[in-house]
Image: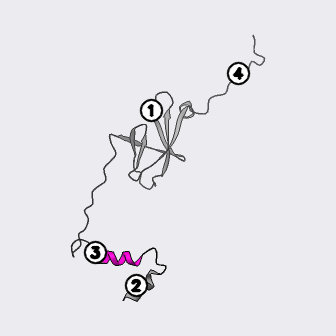
């Protein structure tokens, strides 16, 4: 069968098929810059002058499941896969000069318990009457 018009009616493809035919999943970025995806830990790389987003989209190929891109709005983030999530640095706590924190005595516990007795409508007035 002959074409009615001899001019080719096909248009060039203006989109990348890899970007159209992929799975896009939203993920939350943790405080250490990591995203969990498919059992993997992906850490976003720091970029000076750019604020790390709270939510990103992980783009993965539909067939193989490999990560193609991590995006937030129009920004494409670079990342690296980690073997495990980075551990938090242990910050030593400052010790008080006066020693450990004061613990209430048994007498103090009884007074506090008596003060907030649920059957009494006005615990403050009751405390003032005792003194």
Precedes in sequence: disc 3 or disc 4: 4
**Of residues 105 and 81, the one drawn nearer to the viewer in this rendering:** 105
Precedes in sequence: disc 3 or disc 1: 1
Q: Dividing the picture into quarters, in which one does residue 95 lie? A: bottom left
The 10 Å Cα crowd at callout 2, few under 14, some 14 to 19, many 20 or more, is some
Labelled pair 1, 4 in contact (Cβ < 8 Å): no
Which circle marks residue 8 in the picture? Answer: 4
Mark in front: 1 vs 4: 1
The 10 Å Cα crowd at callout 1, few under 14, some 14 to 19, many 20 or more, is few
Q: Residues under labels 1 and 4: Cα distance?
A: 37 Å
**Of residues 91 and 12, the one drawn nearer to the viewer in this rendering:** 91
Q: Residues under labels 3 and 4: Cα distance?
A: 94 Å
Magenta segment's dominant SS is helix
Which image quarter is the C terminus in? Answer: bottom left
* Residue where numbered disc 2 is placed: 127
Precedes in sequence: disc 1 or disc 2: 1
Image location (x, y in percent) of residue 56: 49, 46
Q: Secondary structure at mark 1?
A: loop
Q: Which residues are magenta?
A: 108-116
Which circle marks residue 106 in the picture? Answer: 3
The 10 Å Cα crowd at callout 3, few under 14, some 14 to 19, many 20 or more, is few
Q: Is residue 10 above or below residue 83?
A: above
């Amino acid at each position: 069968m002959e074409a009615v018009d001899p001019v080719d009616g096909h248009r060039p493809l203006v989109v990348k098929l890899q970007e159209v035919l992929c799975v896009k999943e939203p993920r939350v970025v943790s405080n250490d810059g990591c995203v969990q995806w498919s059992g993997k830990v992906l850490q976003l790389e720091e970029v000076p002058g750019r604020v790390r987003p709270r939510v990103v989209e992980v783009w993965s190929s539909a067939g193989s499941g490999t990560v193609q891109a991590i995006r937030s709005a129009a920004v494409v983030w670079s990342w690296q896969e980690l073997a495990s999530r980075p551990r938090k640095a242990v910050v030593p706590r400052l010790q008080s000069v006066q020693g450990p924190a004061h613990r209430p005595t048994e007498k103090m516990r009884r007074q506090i318990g008596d003060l907030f007795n649920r059957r009494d409508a006005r615990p403050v007035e009751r405390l003032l009457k005792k003194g």
